[in-house]
Amino acid sequence: MKKKSNLSPVHTLILCSILLTTLIAVVSLFAFFRSVTTEDLKNSIRYARNGHLQEPTENAGESADFETAETAESTETETISSEAETSPPTEETAEVPHPLDFIDELGNSSDLEIQDAPEDIYFVMLDTEMGPMMYYNQGDRRWADYLYGGEDPLEGYGCGPTAVSMLISSFSLEGGGLTPTDMADWAAENGYYALHSGSYHSLIPDSLTAYGFTVESVTNLNREYVSELLESGYVLAALMGKGTLTNNGHFILITKLLEDGHVRIADPNSYENSRKEWELDLLLSELKKGAAAGGPLWAVKME
């Protein structure tokens, strides 16, 4: 015969509660005071490197969770390069000319047109007899609307300041970084701006001399002599008359003599013209008659 328990149901419930509480306390104390393992240290380091020290990558996959910052950056760079090489050019990209993408054709009278100010910003270097030269365009949107003399926009009246600023910014120690707007201000302050007419012809020799160039008036317009000047390292500043490049008057630079006897130019109103080969005889025949200040052709060199 079993001995009857003296514990009432209430006492039994209290005892069970005490035992359960004691068990929970023991487990908690064990978890708190247990030894730190090597795996714990590894996890802590991973957390510090990836959770705090590395910025999360947008749209990154789970496989990249534990990449170092250096590895992630390298992968991103390679991806961008690969896309740039394999993706077909967009319409907008295709319209931007490469600096050395010359047009293999001669300029002629059919090129004559009144151009609207292009929407482009030009960052182009041209090869010249004096060395690499920064190309400026008077219709560049950075200064197309800048008022020359406070009256006339550079896009229509700024071929003079734009042409000489190419030379000065590229070859003069005093004029490094000079822009068409800087040159326009200099011209206006020194009396070379002609209201609603552009620039006085004397802007060419006087501005270039002021910035350290040697400038000579070319009176012998024979093709052979002009070619010799180019071969000797001169760039020629030319005032063009009505013809292929202008309906009235226009300053350009004749920059380089080619092996076939043709030349390249820097036309401040047309990058297209600056990418073509030109017949030297054609340009010489279209120089503006009756130019002042030793024009219409000046030989320019930086000693």
Image: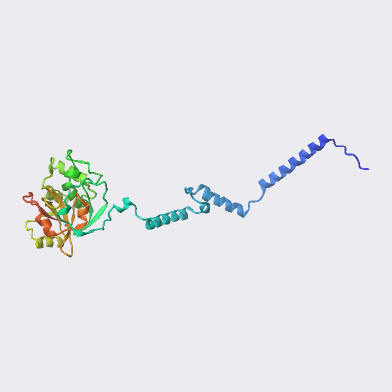
Q: Quadrant of residue 223?
A: bottom left
Q: Residue at x 67, y 47 (%)?
A: 31
Q: Nearer the viewer, residue 124 or 89?
A: 89
Q: Judge left or right: residue 133 versus residue 78.
A: left
Residue located 61% across and 52% down the image: 40
Q: Residue shown at 12%/57% (left/top)? A: 282
Where in the figure is residue 297, as x and y percent of width and height? 10, 54
Q: What percent of the width, then of the height, locates residue 260? A: 17, 65
Tell me if 33 is positioned left or right of 141 in this view: right
Task: Tally the marks.
Answer: 0
In the displayed orientation, state which residue is furthest to the right.
Answer: 1
Residue at the front extreme of this rendering: 110
Q: Quadrant of the C terminus?
A: bottom left
* Residue 153 quadrant: top left
Q: Residue at x 55, y 49 (%)?
A: 47
How is colour applied across the structure in the image?
A: rainbow
Q: Is residue 130 visible?
A: no
Compare residues 140 and 191 and report the one nearer the observer.
140
Estimate the x, y position of residue 242 in percent, counting from the top left.
11, 50
Q: Could one spot residue 11 in this view of the protein? A: yes
Q: Quadrant of the N terminus?
A: top right
Please state the horizontal and vertical placement of residue 233, each as a whole percent of the image.
Answer: 16, 60
Residue at the farthest bottom position: 259
